[in-house]
Structure formats: C-alpha cells, structure tokens
Amino acid sequence: MACSRGKASPETTTKLKLFADSGGYCQNPKCLESLFKEIGGKQIHIAEMAHVFSASNIGPRADKRLSEEERGFYRNLILLCPTCHTIIDKAEEEYPDSTILEWKRTHREKIAERFAVIEYSSRNLACSAVLPKLNENRTIFLQYGPETDGRFNPESSLPIIWRRKIQSTILPNNRHILHVLDANQKYLKDQEFETLEAFRQHVDDFEAYHLGISDEHGSQFPSAMSQILGDCQ
C-alpha cells in the first residue's frame, strides 16, 4: 500500500484504517477482488490506495481547493485492486467522487455487518463473542506460528501457512475482538481496561508489520488478553 506523494502521502494510522475498512477486499462493490494473493509460495498484497480527488492539481478528479495534506487524509482515500484503481483514474468522467465515496461507505457498512458487533446484555455473552476468536488465533499460533519447530526446517511449509493465516484469519479476528470489547466496555474490570489498551497497541503494531507498513515487530500479545472476560461460564 505504498504511496510516495510527499505531503499527500497518508499517515500509518490512515493506512491501517483503510485496511480495516476493506476487510482485505477491493472496495469496488462490483469487484471485491481479494487484496492478498499466494504466488509461488509467497504471500503478497496487491492493495493500492486510490485518491478520490487527485494527489496533484492535474490528476483525476483534481480539486485545487484541497491542500497537499488534505489529499492524504483518510476521507480522500479508498483501497482498491490495481485494475479498479487504473480504471477509475483513466475513465474519471465515469467515476466521479460521489461514486467512489459511495463505494467506500457501502463497503465499510458491509464489513461492519459481517462483524455483527452489538452491545450484549451480560458479561457472559460478551465473553462468548470474544473467546472463540481468541481460541482460533491461539490455535493457529501454536500450530503454525514462529515458535514451532518448523521454523528451523528450510523445507517446511509452516511459515507460508502462518503468513496466509495471519492475513485471512488473525487480522480480521483481532479487529472483531476489539470491536466487541469496545462496544461492551461496561463489563470490563479495572485491570481488563489496561489489557484491552495493550492489546489495541499490539493489533496496531502487528498489522503494520504484516501489511508491510513498518519494519518493526512492535509490542507483543499481552498474555492477560487470553483471560479477558475469562470468568464467564
């Protein structure tokens, strides 16, 4: 998702927010191409950040009233596959800003519906919404993660599977867990608030590293997270 447009280049937080909105798919509702591909045993992403209003004064849908910084703001960007990005820029008269912004809005709503985040009527129900995702992530980590014996075997396929499952399962699960806990904070105990915020920083760092936005691994998964809301039956 690189974008070297000087001041019009989006910040890391903006890039991560765009990825969360996309759910890993092109935001053109008639496309929905997966933005992650496995090619030759290697996981790559093909996501491209497209500007609603051009990053320059002479590009597609240019708006000279916007400053360079405003052109790199979240509201002026959408995540697309390379084909859709090329099409909207080369046929700009067919794809006005209103159409592109509508794509972004409806896609974001569909992702929210998929997560089905609600405020639960009890701590136990909130726990029941979080626990399966935490358990799934843990199972994947134990079977395929960087601490398995397969990391020492150059012929092992485990590292490839691990990277694929990060993108297909762990990243979406992490976002779902955050959404559920944020919507149900009234059930958290004092120490669990600290755990939630530590997990939020881990999710941000984990996404940035595995989406190629940062070279730093960042914060580790907080061990207390495995027990959040853990007294449910």
Image (cartoon, grey):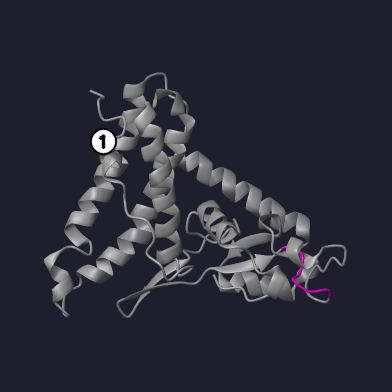
* Residue at 50% from the left image edge and 64% from the top image edge: 33
Locate the C terminus and report the quarter of the image it occupies. Answer: top left
Which is the main secondary structure of the residues drawn in magenta? loop
- Against 86, residue 174 (above or below) is above
Residue 160 figure quarter: bottom left
* Residue range (magenta): 52-57
Locate the N terminus and report the quarter of the image it occupies. Answer: bottom right
Residue 196 figure quarter: top left
Neighbor class of circle 1 (other Cα within 10 Å; few <14, some 14-19, many 20+) is some
* Residue at 64% from the left image edge and 70% from the top image edge: 85
* Residue at 47% from the left image edge and 26% from the top image edge: 119
Does residue 40 appear to the left or right of 47 in the view shown? Answer: left
Q: Position of residue 23 (x, y in %)?
A: 48, 54
Number of residue marks: 1
Q: Position of residue 75 (x, y in %)?
A: 69, 54
Mark 1: secondary structure: helix
Looking at the image, the residue that sits furthest to the right is 65
Does residue 104 appear to the left or right of 157 in the view shown? Answer: right
* Residue at 26% from the left image edge and 30% from the top image edge: 230
According to the picture, the residue beneath numbered tag 1 turns out to be: 227
Q: Position of residue 117 (x, y in %)?
A: 47, 34
Q: Position of residue 2 (x, y in %)?
A: 56, 73
The type of residue carrying mark 1 is Gln
Viewer-proximal residue, 206 or 23?
206
- Against 233, residue 154 (above or below) is below
146 within the magenta span:
no
- Against 221, residue 46 (above or below) is below
- Against 148, residue 101 (above or below) is above
